[in-house]
Amino acid sequence: SDIGKGTYPYYMLKEIDEQPAVLRRILQHYYVDGQYKIDEEILKAIQQADRLYIVAAGTSYHAGFASKAFFEEMTKTPVELCIASEFGYNMPLLSEKPLFIYISQSGETADSRQVLVKTKALGYPALTITNVAGSTLSREADYTLSLHAGPEIAVASTKAYTAQISVMAVLAKAVGDYIGNIAASEFHLVKELSLVATSMVAVLAEKERIAEKVEEHLKGTRNSFYIGRGEDYYVSMEAALKLKEISYIQCEGFAAGELKHGTIALIEENTPVQAILSHKALAPHTRGNIMEVISRGAKVLTVVSDDLANEDDDIIVPSVHPYLTSLAMVVPTQMIAYYATLQRGLDVDKPRNLAKSVTVE
Ligand code: G6P
């Protein structure tokens, strides 16, 4: 059931485990009788826009990044990411016909709502993607799409992130088909999303092994780094946020190639680095960065898709379509955050200083 922890020690673990089912539920809601069920008004609004501005906070902001590449490829429309709390006094120069997409688990984040009020007043259309139908952001936007992830109770967001990316994929595919885009017609979303669910199930079955790796790798540390390139960089940002939020280990998600331009100065004997590799063309470069940090004393834990893995890698993830790698690669990083926190004896579901929904600016 969606309510209660059942046999789980923490909501976060339950919600991590629910992700394959959430992906299947999203397909059931949005793919009916062989058709994508998205209001034609929404498809038209996106077709008419010359640029899409995603406005969000926290994990939802990271879900926007993870969706940017496939959204641009299938809709042929540039996508810009905006941190809600920055937008008010640091507004980007807008295009002629912008459309605003508000991504929010709760639909109540005050920083995002403030931007929605502003862009509505300027006369620009808004679409909200949220887990809470009837929430403020959902009611006040012109259009809304639901995540169908079920209630998310743990403060650290997990299934909402993967649901947000999945719904963005459904939307991009539906728009792409609507405008006759080739990349979209060649992308078999139903099949590919099912493969992601299967990949997740395989990784979720590795809990004990992952917990052991985490114990070995992060025990007693105060800081660490996630590195990756492309989509794996975006996952690194989210993975680092998750680890910080609940385990209080200071962590930075870094574009692997950027490390040498400054941050590598922080690597010393036994600094833990987690590397994410799922992109064929980029993985050899990230491998090079792994060698660089190892030669400065770092210990590295690798999270690698199976088509790129070798026997020294730590966590192997069954590979998925390049558009959807974030969905598969993020799951082990959620488990890393969960176990690191558990091993420190902290309350996974109730981190200090944080609220599930932040309704003040
Ligand atoms: C809070 C939560 C985060 C969340 C962010 C945005 O800070 O602790 O987990 O990502 O708000 O929330 P939203 O509901 O708008 O996705």
Image (cartoon, rainbow, N blue to C red):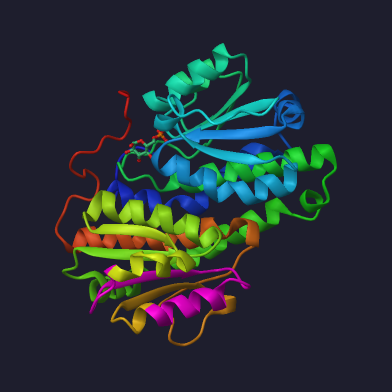
Asked if residue 117 is among those painted magenta in the image, a careful observer would answer no
- Quadrant the C terminus occupies: top left
Query: Is 177 in front, or is 231?
Result: 231
Residue that protrudes farthest toward the top in the picture: 121
Which residue is drawn at the image coordinates 28% and 81% (left, top)? 297
Query: Is 282 in front, or is 242?
Result: 282
Residue 236, quarter of picture: bottom left
Q: Ligand 1: give its quadrant.
A: top left
Percent position (x, y) of residue 56? 46, 35
Indicate whether 323 appears above or below 221.
Answer: above
Residue 200 seen in the current view:
yes
Percent position (x, y) of residue 305? 54, 72
Query: Is 312 in front, or is 23?
Result: 312
Residue that protrudes farthest toward the bottom in the picture: 311
Which residue is drawn at the image coordinates 29% and 45% (left, top)? 5
Query: Is 10 in front, or is 137?
Result: 137
Percent position (x, y) of residue 360? 30, 23
- Please indicate whether residue 330 sits to the left or right of residue 248 in the image: right
Which residue is drawn at the image coordinates 18% and 50% (left, top)? 347
Residue 109 seen in the current view:
no
Residue 296, quarter of picture: bottom left
Which residue is drawn at the image coordinates 56% and 62% (left, top)? 198
- Quadrant the N terminus occupies: top left
Percent position (x, y) of residue 131? 47, 33
Residue that protrudes farthest toward the front in the picture: 261
Indicate whether 222 appears above or below 15.
Answer: below
- Residue stretch rendered in magenta on the structure: 266-292
- Please indicate whether residue 291 sits to the left or right of residue 37 in the image: left
